[in-house]
Image: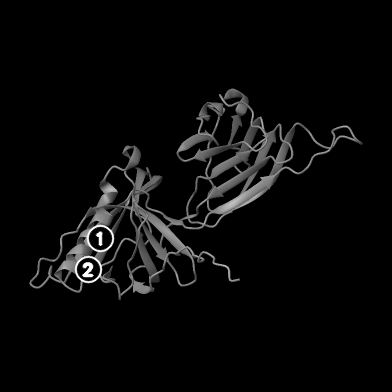
């Protein structure tokens, strides 16, 4: 007899709008992601809203403030370089089949941008995201806040079935971030008895003198996930000697048991157990330096005390870039 089965539902995948030629970056597909996670295609010329390429700016390299000191022999010497917040100018055309449809689209899109200024859960403002995808499949993102510009042209015939706005978007971090993280995994294998037939392991295990490649243009601050068993973990950047140690015996949690985890964020500094405990007191302050990874290759080591089979360290970071 025939069997009745439930229909197979394939999860809807985010649609990438067609690429267009944009100033400063060339051909790219643009999507705006609002604080609620809704995706708004910005380069689909068949949609009811799309970016007007003419007038787009702020997608190139970040701007910098330079601090210098006068030099006694003339000129000056550069002392400090400070990246500045980025401003993106984003013209958008909105239309509708009739005035009702246009008004609905205009209001929805305005809310999608301006809600970046509203306090969300926990009293925190959540930025929107501008995502730039290339024809080769790569993509970069930047967090944006609405600043101004959702006004309309105010010309004759506008505001009935179409209008355009020139948005100013403010970015507290001026750098573009890759949508795909880089990851390094190191895990302890099965260990043998220390004395049979001769010494083979110690109570501390270096999980690898590893070279980490940062393909981006600027420094990144990685995140570390440690899986027990482990009693203390030391992370060292070999080229500078900078290091930090997380001593689990100095925390309310105690040493990590098999399968337990702790996550160390380097920017902002944060240490949390898998159950949400704040373990930042376990860092070896004031000597601890939660170091960054510069562009290119960086030699690092991860050392775990009390390691056993299953102990692991996972390093992850998202490369950051000057341009989209």
Q: How is the image coloured?
A: one colour
Helix, strand or loop at label 2? It is: strand
Task: Identify the secondary structure beneath mark 1.
Answer: helix
- The residue that appears at 17% across and 64% down in the rendered structure is 103
Instruction: Answer left or right for 270 relative to 118.
Output: right
Query: Quadrant of residue 3 in the image?
Result: bottom right
Image point 66% across, 42% down: which residue?
312
Q: Label for residue 94? A: 2
Q: Residue visible at 83% across and 38% down?
A: 192
Q: Nearer the viewer, residue 118 or 66?
A: 118
Q: State if disc 1 and disc 2 touch (CB < 8 Å).
A: yes
Tell me the quarter of the picture where residue 257 sits.
top right
Instruction: Tell me the residue that label 1 is attached to.
Output: 109
Residue 39 higher or lower than 193, as above or below: below
State the quadrant of the N terminus.
Answer: bottom right
Residue 189, image x, y percentages:
76, 44
Residue 231 at x, y percent in the picture: 66, 30
Asked if residue 25 shows in the view, the reply is no
């Amino acid at each position: 007899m025939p069997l009745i089965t439930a229909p197979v539902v394939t999860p809807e995948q985010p649609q990438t709008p067609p690429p267009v030629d944009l100033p400063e970056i060339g051909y790219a597909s643009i999507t705006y992601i609002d604080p609620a996670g809704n995706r708004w295609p910005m380069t689909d010329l068949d949609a009811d809203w799309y970016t007007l390429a003419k007038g787009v700016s702020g997608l190139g390299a970040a701007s910098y403030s330079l601090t210098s000191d006068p030099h006694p022999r003339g000129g000056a010497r550069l002392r400090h370089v400070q990246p500045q917040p980025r401003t993106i100018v984003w013209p958008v055309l909105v239309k509708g089949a009739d005035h009702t449809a246009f008004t609905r689209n205009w209001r929805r899109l305005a809310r999608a941008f301006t809600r970046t200024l509203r306090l969300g859960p926990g009293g925190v403002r959540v930025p929107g995201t501008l995502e730039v995808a290339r024809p080769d499949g790569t993509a970069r993102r930047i967090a944006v806040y609405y600043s101004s510009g959702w006004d309309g042209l105010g010309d004759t015939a506008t505001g009935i079935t179409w209008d355009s706005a020139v948005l100013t978007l403010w970015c507290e971090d001026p750098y573009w971030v890759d949508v795909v993280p880089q990851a390094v995994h190191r895990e302890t294998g099965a260990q043998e008895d220390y004395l049979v037939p001769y010494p083979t392991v110690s109570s501390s295990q270096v999980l690898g003198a590893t070279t980490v490649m940062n393909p981006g243009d600027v420094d990144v601050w990685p995140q570390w996930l440690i899986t027990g068993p482990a009693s203390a973990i030391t992370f060292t950047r070999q080229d500078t000697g900078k290091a930090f140690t997380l001593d689990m015996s100095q925390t309310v949690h105690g040493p990590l048991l098999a399968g337990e985890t702790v996550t160390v964020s380097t920017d902002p500094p944060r240490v949390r157990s898998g159950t949400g405990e704040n373990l930042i007191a376990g860092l070896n302050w004031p000597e601890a330096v939660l170091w960054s990874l510069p562009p290119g290759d960086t030699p690092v080591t991860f050392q775990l005390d009390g390691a056993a089979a299953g102990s692991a360290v996972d390093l992850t970071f998202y490369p950051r870039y000057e341009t989209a």
